[in-house]
Amino acid sequence: MRTRIIKAGDLFTGESQQIYDDEFSGEYGEEILSPPYNLKQLKTMAEYSTILRQCVEAYKTNIVGFGFGYEYSFDYNADGIPASEQKEARKQWTELEEFINYLHYDETPKTIFSHMLEDREQTGNGYIEVIRNVAGKPSGIEYMASEYVRVCKKQKEAQEVEMSVLRSGTFETVKCKRKFRKFVQMINGQKVYFKEYGDPRKMSKKTGEYYGEDETVPAGDQATEVLQFKIGAGAYGVPRWIGHLINMSGARKAEELNYRYFLNGRHVPAAVMVQGGMLTESTIKRLQEYSNQVQGVEEAHKWLIIEAYGEEEGNDVDGYEENSNVKVEIKSLAEMVQDDALFLEYDRTHRAKLRSAFRLPPLYTGEADEYNKATADTARKITEEQVFQPERETIAGKLNRIFLPELNISKVRLKLKGPDFRDPLEMARAIGSIIRGNGASPNDLRDLAGEILGKDLEEWPEEEYNRPLKMNQQGFPVELEKAKKRAGQQSDTVMIMKDIRDYLQRVAYHDKR
């Protein structure tokens, strides 16, 4: 018995043909640290995953997508706050707002930080270049692609630096010792060095060497500073989804296998069994051609003719040879191949695992079939409380710590805005009870009214609006009714005086006649 296996040619390999080369290969050693994973490959994993990009987009949208906001670092409307301090706070508010708005001239700061956050979630590392003006103050930022940046070893000798510390509302300068890193970027074989933010020394961007305090830096050779946002405490960050890398590769292979199944879907795997004979060479050749060509809708209606010849055998009765009866049977092997839903549960499990790495419910990745309003609100609030709000505070806290002392801004701080989950109808019902219980003054409600109306409302300067208004049984302010009565009494008095004036004018006119 002879057996031949006929299969389709390798028309679709299902494997990436990219070469994830590392431009820094050969550069790692005493100074430049090697990353734990290939950063270019990590950056491109989102192109092969069906769920990773949605998770990264959810982080970008909910952490920095609502933009930057500002808040006073003290109770601006508290009693006893001097007017001069309020004026200074308003001035610092304007300065910080203008500083953030013009950190980049072509893009908004929200866009730059979105790019950084995307890199951080894909590779574990995000970088922002900080540019200073001629006065030495930070004035601009630029996005740095993480796959081209490498971290250098932290220096052994600590440098004595001056830092500004906020105490009792004012900045004080203290001295401390810090160890700094250098960063290096390589694109198309060209290397550029950067300092860690806060390093006061002058450094060459071409060689990474530090200049002496009395040395003059050549024009165009001054290295700028870098802010690193990473996941983890190592020199390099590690993506939060790195433990699911095998699942992502398996899900990709399942997708490729399904693709080949549908691509060659008309071809049913089968065994051609010939009994009492054998297939001709031309038939075997046509079977091979059939396997290679059976793709696409244009091949959906074709006939396959199989030819076989019987083996010769002797006949003892008549004394001559005759061919045996040939039996050709085609047995389907389709039950041994996957159907279109074989990997459906595997893919569903993979998506759930990757979402758990980001701690995201399905609602944030566009899978909200099983949600109603109550469950959706609960999922959003828990995720906001446990995931997004801490991330915003971490990023905003770092920016406040490094930028505000440089700008000498102490009465205002930066924050990242988040979504508003409050229901106006529910708030109105709750506030109505507070007002009827004389628990809120009109000025207490001005900020809330401004948020509902979508506009900024100033507080009323009169002292009576800083105290709760007494309500009658119908829920209307008593002072308002008294004011109306006073206005009504005043109008009655005015009318009476006008009548008396008209009467005196008529009497005087008749006396003259």
Image (spheres, rainbow, N blue to C red):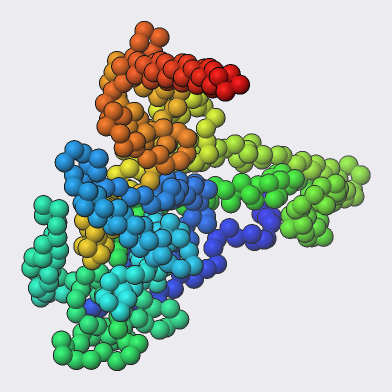
Residue 80 against residue 202 in the figure, above or below:
above
Residue 22 showing in the rendered view: yes
Residue 210 falls in which quadrant of the image? Answer: bottom left
Q: Is residue 304 left or right of residue 98?
A: right
Residue 219 placement (x, y as % from top left): 33, 90
Where 134 sits versus 476, above or below?
below
The picture places residue 413, in percent across and down from the top left corner, at 27, 52
- Residue sitting nearer the eye, 502 or 209: 502
Of 178 and 243, the residue lying toward us: 178
Identify which residue, 44 or 226, lies in the foreground: 226
Q: Quadrant of the C terminus?
A: top right
Residue at the image point whose x is 49% and y is 71% from the top: 19
| Residue drawn where x is 9% and y is 73% of the image | 160
Expressed as whole percent of the image width and height from the top left, the position of residue 12 reads 64, 59
Q: Residue at x 42, y 42 (%)?
A: 456
- Toward the viewer: 367 or 382? 382
| Side of 452 relative to 6 (left or right) | left
